[in-house]
Amino acid sequence: MSKTDRHIAMPVIRRLPRYYRCLCNMEQNGIEKISSRALAEAMNITASQVRQDLNCFGGFGQQGYGYIVSMLRGEIAKLLGMDSKKKTVLYGVGNLGRAIIYHFDFEKFGFELCGLFDTNPELVGTELGGLIISDDEELEKFTEDHTVDAAILCIPTTSAEEVVEKLYAAGVRCFLNFNHFDIKSRYPDCVVENVHLSESLMTLGYLMTDKSNSAEE
């Protein structure tokens, strides 16, 4: 059964990066083989959950033998698309965009940052991370000359609708989105990963408050 013939639940997909990080740590510590129970303990889930998750992709271990750490890490890396280079542009080279460019290893995770765009005339034409920041008016020409697979949006919600429209018209269908514009509702054929720092902070705030309230009871 091919990958397109099966539906993988999103919670399973979201655990794959955790599996990858866990296996990388094990490999670095010289662990060559691991059982589903030991992997489950490291992941803080059940051994049954580990087996169910990995069986979604065909299974990678042998009953009574376990998993070869390096092999399982490599297979999960393939599932996560880390063995390919997806050409990516970043739109919005403000503080957030700069932080991502300076501190994120795109190639390690299968992405190649190939273009930077901004509307600030003071930034356009300057170099950052080995790339020249382009004006958004150059976007159409850039996408004609390059096959752009994905876009990272480090822009305010107020600017997002217009920018996404331009990127969509240029053929971009995959987005890492750092604002609250609902791309999927407007363009349902897109693949979108939303990153909302404010929501994470509010969730943290709830958990901290809940913990304090529990301690007082």
Image: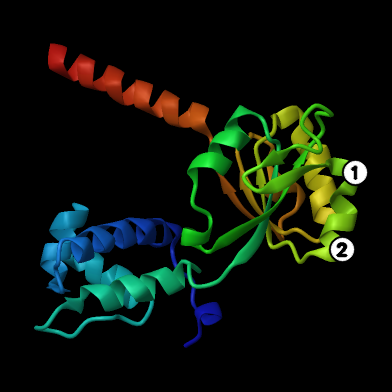
Q: Residue at x 11, y 66 (%)?
A: 37
Helix, strand or loop for disc 1: helix
Circle 2 residue: 144
Closest to the observer, 46 or 35? 35
Tell me whether the residue at label 1 lies in contact with that at label 2, contact meaning CB atoms closer than 8 angstroms.
no
Quadrant (top left, top right, bottom left, bottom right) of the C terminus: top left
Q: Is residue 113 above or below residue 197?
A: below
Crowd tier of the residue under label 2, counting other residues whose Cα lies within 10 Å: few below 14, some 14–19, many 20 or above: few
Position of 73 relative to 208 (above/below): below
Q: Is residue 195 visible?
A: no
Taking the view exactly as shown, the residue that stands out farthest to the left is: 64
Q: Nearer the viewer, residue 41 or 97?
A: 97
Q: Check disc 1 and report the residue beneath it.
A: 137
Relative placement, left or right, of 143 versus 115 is: right
Q: Position of residue 176 (x, y in %)?
A: 61, 48
Question: In the displayed structure, does residue 164 sit left or right of residue 129?
Answer: right
The colour mode here is: rainbow
**Residue 129 showing in the rendered view:** yes
For the point 57% across and 43% down, which residue is it?
Answer: 101
Query: Percent position (x, y) of residue 104?
Result: 49, 46
- Measuring 75% from the left and 37% from the top, which residue is drawn there? 126
Left or right: residue 119 compared with residue 5? right
Mark 2 secondary-structure assignment: helix
> Which comes sooner in the sequence, label 1 or label 2?
1
Q: Amino acid at mark 2?
A: Glu
In which quadrant of the rendered view does residue 214 lie?
Answer: top left
Residue 153 quadrant: top right
